[in-house]
Image (cartoon, rainbow, N blue to C red):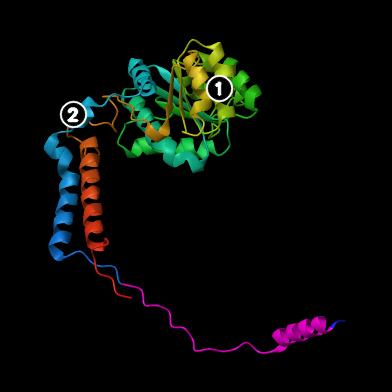
Amino acid sequence: PTEQERQDAALFHRIASAPPPLGPPRQPATPLAAPMPERPWRLALALLIILAALMPLITRGRLDATHSPQPGAAAFAGTLDALQPGDRVIVAYDYAPSANAELAPAGQAAVADLAARSVGLVALSSRPEGVDIARQSLESLAVDGLPLRYGTDYALLGYLAGDATGLRLAATDLAAAFAQTDAAGTPLERLPILNGLNKAIDADAILVLTDDANVARRWIEQVGARTDAPVLMLTTAAIEPLLVPYADSSQLAALVSGAYAGIPSGSMPSAPSGPGQSLSSADGFLALWIVLVIAFVVGLRLTGPSSERRP
């Protein structure tokens, strides 16, 4: 090795073997405490929030009266309202529990509206996890105080196996598709609600709640194409764009996403019967938005560049 290489090797050895130099420990900087708004500001903001919550009672829901529902939601509500007492609707709960928060509110409102108007409900699911969801949905109707009788006003057929093959069989023979019994093992012939409803395509309407585009397509292609009854689809926002062509071609009577399904039906229990009857109004949300803007401006005033900060 050359002399320069010897010096480099010695320097490397010294760096690798010498202990690190210890200096005085650095003290972390003390974080500045967030300035608290003064008491008058806090009281004013609290009063504004309370006022925003009560705003629909003051304005009587004027913004709701000017709100125009989306075409899909209007068609959905119109189809439901056209059903008469004694009609029977097949309700398919074909979604996973993870989609319950998005689909259950609008779906339960639609089912409760039908039950309140004496429209028969025949529930089923082509997904195993959907059977319990259907059972809970139907049981909640009794909790809401609706005088429903099982077998006469509603029924739960259970799990429809076989994917597309099962749907084709149910479209032409419900008894064969469910092995002659419902979810509880009761023979289908003992259920008055199924008298004359031997095939799914004989129902007066079909309502499908699903978060799976493939399941939705199977219902449209295997059942909807075989019946003149309206097929309504309540889906998640993630798959709604995939089903728009079916709605545009009139293969679906209505397509609604549960994320914004403000279904405008006057007979629905979840919808306000008149202006100002519900605190969940656009007037209240607008008032709350104004309060948030005021709070944001106040926060900038207290913590902006003009406020004095010391290290």
Tag shown at residue 219: 1
Q: Is residue 196 visible?
A: no
Q: Whole-percent x and y of residue 135?
A: 46, 37
Q: Whole-percent x and y of residue 124?
A: 52, 29
Q: Is residue 305 above or below residue 184?
A: below
Residue hosting label 2: 274
Q: Given the image, on which type of amino acid does mark 1 rest?
A: Trp
In-image side of 148 versus 177 (left or right): left
Q: Is residue 164 visible?
A: yes
Decide whether residue 17 is among the magenta residues.
yes
Q: Image quadrant of residue 8?
A: bottom right
In-image side of 87 versus 181 (left or right): left
> For mark 2, does the 10 Å Cα neighbourhood hold few (<14), some (14 to 19), or many (20 or more) residues?
few
Residue at the image point whose x is 56% and y is 89% from the top? 22
Task: Provide the residue span drawn in magenta.
Answer: 3-32
Of all residues shown, which one is farthest toward the top?
228
> Quarter holding the C terminus?
bottom left
> Quarter holding the N terminus?
bottom right
Decide whether residue 129 is among the magenta residues.
no
Q: Nearer the viewer, residue 46 or 84?
A: 46
Q: Nearer the viewer, residue 310 or 216?
A: 310
